[in-house]
Image: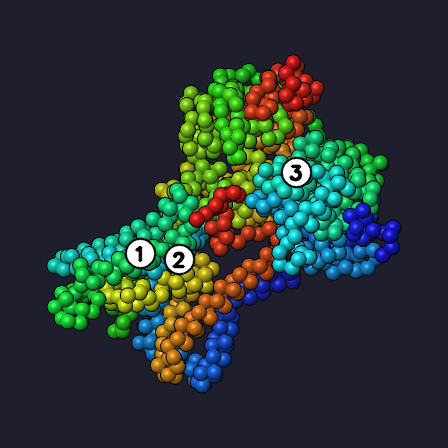
């Protein structure tokens, strides 16, 4: 390989990678149906498609995690045999999964070194690793401290570590499966700066996202999958939001939900002067007081990590309060356990749904009753009532359009977005008096997002009091009646719907009080 | 037309199901090499083994009798491993259950059997429950590693047994005699479990099989079983769903111990009719507390699968005894053979999981064997 063909990171380029006629069959699902896909050095190729279209599957085939039933992969024109992720890494392919695979109790450098051979034999030379981490970080604008522990890092920082880890292993082509789903808008901007630097340097990037504006912003080309087949590829310059949505779904989507006038009722959820610590033992909530009334959506805006998670956990009884009171309906639920609180008519859509919202090995039916497995009609005299359970699960799947071959399919076999839909279906179908919804549309395609928004509005009309926690300002602005802004564990202000806009919320989110 | 791919999957499934059996044969093949080195004819040896395990009604009955405690311990293992906790305390739980049953039997010799026998079983069940429940509570509320604590509970049970048999429960005949063999008096014959056919086969085997079906129904058909499995697979999601995770950790270990304890009671009422010791747990249990774990793994941690698995394992143990007697090889050979089978079966299990993970999905988790790790939060240390 000559000078010109190697990257700043020192690895050889992949000028052209081609996947040809890829077929991947799962029991009952044809996830990839003769898919052709290619990516070149120096471009971001975006992969779009509805939940369950087959994007992750195609990428896992490329990364050696799945063996395709048919098809071949060509690197710079030569057939490549990729039977495992280590084969892929050896060929210069890296992948960043949506769910990070870092060890929280180790440092950044230790995580990068994990599983590598070292120059000093058995003992990994962490100093050498650290130096290299700093070097790579500088090259691509990925600032992290090599000696920091993973558990101390924000999600955005952890993602940088994942990227550094891939680059350290010599990635010339990087697959990023929904990397922006968990990031704040500012972190997305930072990530894109890195992307541009990498692309300029000659990396090839494959980028998956459900957010069309991101795709239009960063990519050079877009390929759309639907039901496992390629619908088409377009140059980003020639693409529009509407056109892409049309290609993905086959109909017009992305309509804003109608915000009908609703008479708000009495306060359903009252928070009085809440104080609580984070997992790390620092003050996360410092005197939060809020009220959510029946028929109202209270948006909670803020940069993630300012106490949103702790607030939700305190309300649901998952975290201990230091001080303050939580009143649900007329009842004081302070200090009650999660089971008791949820029985009082509270639903909770947790943020980390893949970890906290479902059990991967349980099938769809079992997951559908995760909260209510012990109550009528799902359980009678301690026995699970399967006919009722499967009928109920079938209804959820149908209503929320969860794509699955059967109700006996383990949840882990669903696509990321379809798992999300199942959890949302479960929580929204309980007809809760109070709903805590944390990032409810994260990971959903545009059609599903639209449906969830409609459902939230319907529930509002039926009198549910909703606390909507979201980092997506557009979502908050579209749905909320009032918007509270949280900053460093304190409520900076509450803005009425008609007075709220991105500017005044943005200032409050940055901790600036008018 | 049949999809060739589905056919291939069926084939993989069959391979997976047969894997423990193949692993056993592999272990026997290694055993054959050892036999040759010992100067014995392996074919003759294994023929003696099969003969010993299945050759006659009597040997078949012995096999089943030997399998019964394995199945009882194995059922408990199914519960605890599904609940995400690892119970290595079967030996101690068997011993405590046996002591419980013996005490009841010695205490009420005049009372009718239809009352005492169930009471003795209940005592065994409860004694095992306590012996499993203590490590369960230590794990749930003080974050003490259950592998270590259950092993320590084994040691405590053995010392307790030795103490009881040295004096408080010592057979009065032995007490008067100079020999002082550490054993209790024989329970009155009325308390012997009924024999099913004129062999050593007793009702306990039937009880164990019925319990296997009940454990299956418990784990997969009741809401408590649902919770145990949920906690074992994902404690975080269980907590978010309002399940009191700690309580179900205690319950899984408690029930696990209870089944082993009941197994100990059945050994007393059906086989030994008295408690005795050789100073270790093995003298009484024949290592059923450990072999039961392997039987459960062999049965894919499924109560129904554990029935044939225990039977096969029982056959191996009974057959190996016969082999040793016929071939005159050192008795250590049997222990070695037993160990080989354990190593091969457990490794094949791990290998098959890895393989299926690679085949289907990289992110699939290993619920049962990983259970203990999942309960740890980052940064938390365990003793
Ligand atoms: N390991 C698996 N076993 C069985 N079926 C699977 C498996 N992984 C994916 N599938 C199925 O393949 C289809 C495509 O899934 P995939 O994860 O590729 O979708 P996706 O396009 O990434 O969707 P999302 O946007 O929701 O992440 C889905 O219908 C899913 O149910
Ligand atoms: Mg996906």
Residue in the picture at 58% in, 46% down = A106
The residue closer to the viewer here, A311 or B156, is: B156
Residue in the picture at 26% in, 66% down = B277
Residue in the picture at 78% in, 35% down = A216
Residue occupied by mark 1: B156
> Could you tell me which secondary element the residue under label 3 belongs to?
helix
Give me the C-alpha separation between circle 2 and circle 1.
Answer: 14 Å
Give me the C-alpha separation between circle 3 and circle 1.
Answer: 49 Å
Circle 2 marks a residue in which chain? B
The residue closer to the viewer here, B30 or A421, is: B30
> Could you tell me which secondary element the residue under label 1 belongs to?
helix
Residue in the picture at 70% in, 19% down = A503
Give me the C-alpha separation between circle 2 and circle 3.
Answer: 41 Å
Q: Which mark is on residue A157?
A: 3
On the picture, is B160 further left or further right than A122? left
Same-chain check, marks 2 and 3:
no
Which label lies toward us, 2 or 1?
1
Quick one: label 2, few (<14), some, or many (20+) residues within 10 Å?
Answer: many
On the picture, is A244 further left or further right than B204? right
Q: Which mark is on residue A116?
A: none
Circle 3 marks a residue in which chain? A
């Amino acid at each position: 390989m000559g000078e010109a063909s190697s990257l700043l990171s020192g690895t050889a380029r992949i000028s052209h990678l081609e996947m040809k006629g890829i077929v991947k069959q799962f029991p009952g699902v044809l996830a990839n149906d003769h898919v052709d896909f290619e990516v070149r050095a120096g471009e971001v190729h975006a992969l779009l498609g509805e939940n369950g279209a087959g994007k992750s599957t195609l990428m896992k085939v490329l990364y050696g995690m799945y063996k395709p039933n048919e098809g071949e992969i060509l690197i710079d024109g030569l057939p490549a045999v990729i039977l495992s992720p280590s084969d892929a890494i050896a060929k210069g392919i890296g992948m960043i999964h949506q769910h990070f695979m870092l060890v929280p109790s180790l440092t950044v450098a230790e995580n990068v070194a994990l599983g590598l051979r070292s120059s000093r034999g058995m003992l990994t030379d962490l100093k050498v690793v650290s130096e290299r981490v700093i070097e790579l970080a500088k090259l691509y604008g990925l600032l992290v401290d090599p000696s920091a522990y993973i558990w101390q890092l924000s999600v955005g920082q952890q993602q940088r570590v994942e990227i550094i880890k891939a680059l350290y292993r010599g990635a010339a082509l990087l697959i990023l499966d929904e990397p922006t789903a968990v990031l704040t808008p500012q972190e997305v901007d930072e990530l894109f700066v890195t992307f541009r630097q990498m692309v300029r340097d000659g990396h090839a990037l494959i980028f998956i996202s459900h957010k069309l504006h991101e795709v239009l912003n960063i990519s050079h080309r877009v390929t759309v999958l639907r039901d496992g087949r390629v619908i088409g590829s377009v140059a980003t310059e020639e693409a529009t939001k509407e056109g892409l949505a049309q290609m993905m779904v086959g109909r017009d989507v992305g309509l804003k939900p109608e915000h009908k006038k609703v008479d708000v009722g009495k306060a359903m959820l009252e928070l009085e002067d809440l104080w609580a610590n984070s997992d790390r033992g620092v003050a996360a909530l410092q005197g939060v007081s809020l009220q959510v009334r029946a028929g109202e959506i209270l948006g909670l805006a803020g940069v993630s990590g300012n106490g949103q998670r702790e607030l939700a956990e305190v309300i649901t009884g998952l975290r201990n309060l230091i001080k303050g009171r939580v009143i649900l309906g007329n009842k004081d639920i302070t200090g009650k356990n999660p089971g008791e609180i949820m029985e009082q008519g509270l639903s909770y859509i947790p943020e980390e749904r893949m970890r906290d919202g479902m059990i991967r090995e349980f099938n769809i039916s079992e997951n559908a009753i995760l909260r209510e497995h012990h109550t009528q009609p799902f359980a009678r005299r301690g026995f699970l009532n399967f006919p009722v359970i499967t009928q109920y699960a079938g209804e959820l799947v149908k209503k929320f359009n969860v794509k699955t071959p059967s109700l006996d399919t383990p949840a882990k076999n669903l696509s990321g977005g379809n798992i999300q839909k199942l959890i949302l279906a479960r929580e929204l179908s309980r007809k809760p008096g109070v709903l805590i919804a944390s990032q409810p549309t994260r990971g959903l395609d545009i059609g599903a997002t639209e449906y969830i928004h409609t459902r939230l509005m319907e529930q509002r009309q039926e009198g549910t009091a909703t606390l909507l926690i979201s980092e997506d300002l557009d979502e908050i602005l579209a749905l909320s009646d009032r918007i509270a802004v949280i900053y460093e564990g304190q409520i900076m202000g509450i803005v009425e719907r008609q007075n709220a806009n991105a500017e005044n919320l943005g200032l409050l989110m940055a901790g600036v009080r008018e | 037309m049949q999809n060739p791919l589905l056919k291939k999957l069926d084939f993989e499934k069959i391979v997976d199901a047969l894997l423990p059996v193949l692993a056993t044969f592999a272990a026997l093949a290694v055993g054959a090499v050892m036999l040759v080195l010992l100067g014995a004819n392996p074919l003759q040896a294994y023929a003696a083994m099969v003969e010993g395990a299945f050759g006659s009604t009597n040997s078949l009955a012995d096999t089943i009798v030997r399998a019964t405690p394995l199945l009882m311990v194995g059922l408990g293992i199914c519960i605890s491993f599904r609940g995400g906790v690892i119970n290595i305390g079967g030996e101690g739980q068997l011993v405590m259950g046996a002591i419980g049953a013996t005490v009841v039997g010695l205490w009420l010799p005049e009372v009718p059997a239809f009352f005492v026998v169930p009471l003795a079983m209940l005592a065994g069940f409860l004694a095992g429950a306590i012996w499993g429940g203590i490590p369960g509570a230590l794990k749930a509320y003080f974050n003490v590693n259950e592998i270590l604590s259950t092993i320590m509970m084994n040691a405590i049970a053995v010392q307790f047994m030795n103490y009881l048999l040295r004096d408080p429960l010592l057979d009065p005949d032995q007490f008067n005699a100079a020999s002082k063999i550490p054993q209790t008096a024989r329970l009155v014959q009325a308390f012997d479990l009924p024999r099913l056919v004129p062999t050593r086969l007793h009702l306990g085997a039937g009880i164990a099989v019925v319990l296997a079906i009940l454990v299956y129904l418990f784990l997969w058909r009741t809401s408590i079983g649902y919770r145990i499995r949920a906690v074992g697979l994902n404690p975080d999601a269980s907590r978010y769903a309002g399940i009191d995770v700690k309580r179900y950790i205690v319950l899984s270990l408690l029930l696990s111990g209870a089944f082993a304890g009941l197994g100990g009671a059945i050994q007393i009422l059906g086989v030994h009719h008295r408690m005795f010791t050789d100073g270790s747990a093995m003298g009484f249990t024949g290592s059923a507390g450990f072999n039961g774990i392997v039987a459960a793994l062999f049965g894919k941690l499924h109560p129904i699968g554990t029935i044939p698995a225990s039977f096969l394992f029982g056959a191996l143990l009974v057959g190996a005894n016969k082999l040793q007697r016929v071939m005159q090889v050192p008795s250590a050979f049997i222990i070695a053979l037993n160990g080989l089978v354990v190593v091969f079966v457990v490794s094949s299990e791990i290998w098959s999981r890895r393989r299926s993970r690679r085949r289907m999905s990289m992110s699939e988790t290993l619920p049962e064997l990983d259970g203990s790790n999942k309960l740890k939060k980052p940064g938390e240390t365990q003793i």
